[in-house]
Image (tube, rainbow, N blue to C red):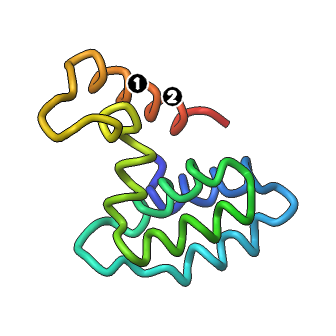
Amino acid sequence: MTTDAELVAAKAVAMFSATSESVLDLLSEYEPPSSMSADRIRLAILKLADGDESKLLEKIELAEIDPRDVVGEAEYPRQMRHPPGMATEEMILADRADYEAWLSSE
């Protein structure tokens, strides 16, 4: 079974192959200001950065302000575009399927 930290490292290598060590260093410096899982937030940052180092830095800064914004944008993009309580079951399932597909992709 893969740990979240191993998944973060694998995603960093897959998305930033040439600079994955520096990306992992940047991500390891990030400490969540809340009780949220640091690796969950790091995965969200990687997903949103999509291989772009400037986006990576932007999303790290956003996570330092409020990590829920980063996690929401990465894991629940459809739901985040609607007022609270207005998400449909289809949106919820699609968001979950998309995120799980991204997690399992190489």
Asked whether 37 or 68 is in front, the reply is 68
- In the displayed orientation, state which residue is furthest to the left: 85
Q: Pick the quarter of the image with the N terminus.
A: top left
Please name the residue shown 21% across and 38% down the image. Answer: 83
Q: Which residue is mark 2?
A: 101
Q: Which element is circle 1 on?
A: helix
Q: Which element is circle 2 on?
A: helix
Q: Pick the quarter of the image with the C terminus.
A: top right
Please name the residue shown 55% across and 84% down the image. Answer: 29
List x then y, in percent, for residue 48. 57, 50
Residue 95 picture quarter: top left
Q: How many marks?
A: 2
- Using the image, tell me which numbered label, if any, was put on residue 22: none
Q: Is residue 75 left or right of residue 36?
A: right
- In the displayed orientation, state which residue is furthest to the top: 90
Q: Which residue is mark 1?
A: 97
Q: Is residue 6 left or right of residue 21?
A: left
Name above or below for residue 92 compared with residue 73: above
Asked whether 27 or 61 is in front, the reply is 61
List x then y, in percent, for residue 100. 44, 32
Q: Is residue 16 left or right of residue 81?
A: right
Question: In the image, what residue type sits under mark 2?
Answer: Ala
Name above or below for residue 94 compared with residue 59: above
Please name the residue shown 36% across and 77% down the image. Answer: 32
Q: Are marks 1 and 2 in contact (CB under 8 Å)?
A: yes
Question: In the image, what residue type sits under mark 1?
Answer: Ala
**Mark 2 neighbour class, 10 Å CA radius: few under 14, some 14 to 19, many 20 or more:** few
Name above or below for residue 91 compared with residue 74: above
Residue 39 picture quarter: bottom left
- In the displayed orientation, state which residue is furthest to the front: 83
List x then y, in percent, for residue 52. 74, 56
